[in-house]
Amino acid sequence: DTEVTQTPKHLVMGMTNKKSLKCEQHMGHRAMYWYKQKAKKPPELMFVYSYEKLSINESVPSRFSPECPNSSLLNLHLHALQPEDSALYLCASSQLGTENTEAFFGQGTRLTVV
Amino acid sequence: AQTVTQSQPEMSVQEAETVTLSCTYDTSESNYYLFWYKQPPSRQMILVIRQEAYKQQNATENRFSVNFQKAAKSFSLKISDSQLGDTAMYFCAFMKPLHNKFYFGSGTKLNVKP
């Protein structure tokens, strides 16, 4: 199983809503990532979890709240978003260490904030 | 800081022909990993090929090969016998071992024409 599964695939939310994005992998990877991708742009790193602990936060606004409940799951809680937060949100996972360092990506959640 | 530059925003190639995508990077590290990822319209980022900086031999994966010039900090991707399914955005990426942070270039949109 080399899949990273993201749900939902599409999400439309109002600026006052609270929603969550979910990501799951069963490859035994101990690093998990959230990326934000605008159209025709490269992915921008938001958060990295290593061994279920937040290791990198790229100065992301607090309206985005990540959570890693266990080694297979990664959530991104959304609250009071702005229209400019509309984007593709990608989850990825990888091994930790010097070997097998490739990141496996999910298909993303297309988020629209109205 | 690491930077990755892809100077070709868009390229076209005829089916069955060969095309080369360029990537340069800037780093003071001696050991690192380089990747080419493909993102088709389906949105999922898929690993095309990986190169370890300490290996002098250029990586190959079937129709895909790289020209890795460490001194010049250049990492180009050659696609032979281009197929319609190769149409996608291609991102060059850099990663330091144990750092868990991928730096992506701005991407090259490749169109394979029948």
Image: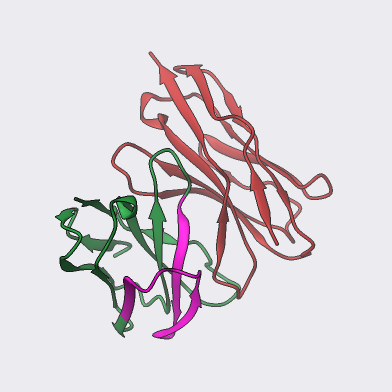
Q: Where's residue B61, x and y in %?
A: 53, 44
Residue at (54% x, 27% y) in the render: B80
Q: In this view, does B11 lie above or below A39?
A: above
Q: Residue at x 39, y 46 (%)?
A: A38
Q: The green chain is which one?
A: A
Quarter of the figure with residue B15: top left
The part of the chain drawn in magenta is A43-67
The location of residue A21, given as percent across then percent down, is 23, 66
Q: Is residue B41 left or right of residue A48?
A: left
| Quadrant housing the C terminus of chain B | top left
Q: Which residue is drawn at 43% across and 85% down?
A: A51
Q: Quadrant of the N terminus of chain B?
A: bottom right
In magenta segment, residue A27: no
Residue A90 x %, y %: 35, 58
Tell me, what colour scheme is on the image?
by chain
| Residue at image point 62% right, 38% down | B6
Q: Where is residue B82 in the image (x, y as percent from the top left)?
A: 47, 24
On screen, residue B45 above or below A74: above
Left or right of B1 on screen, residue A36:
left
Residue A58 located within the stretch drawn in magenta = yes
Main SS category, magenta section:
strand
In-front residue for pair A9/A72: A9
Compared with B60, B95 (above or below) is below
- Of B69 and B16, the residue lying toward us: B69
Q: Is residue B36 above or below residue B113?
A: below
Tell which chain the image draws in red. B
Total number of numbered labels? Answer: 0
Question: Seen from this angle, which residue lies furthest right?
Answer: B71
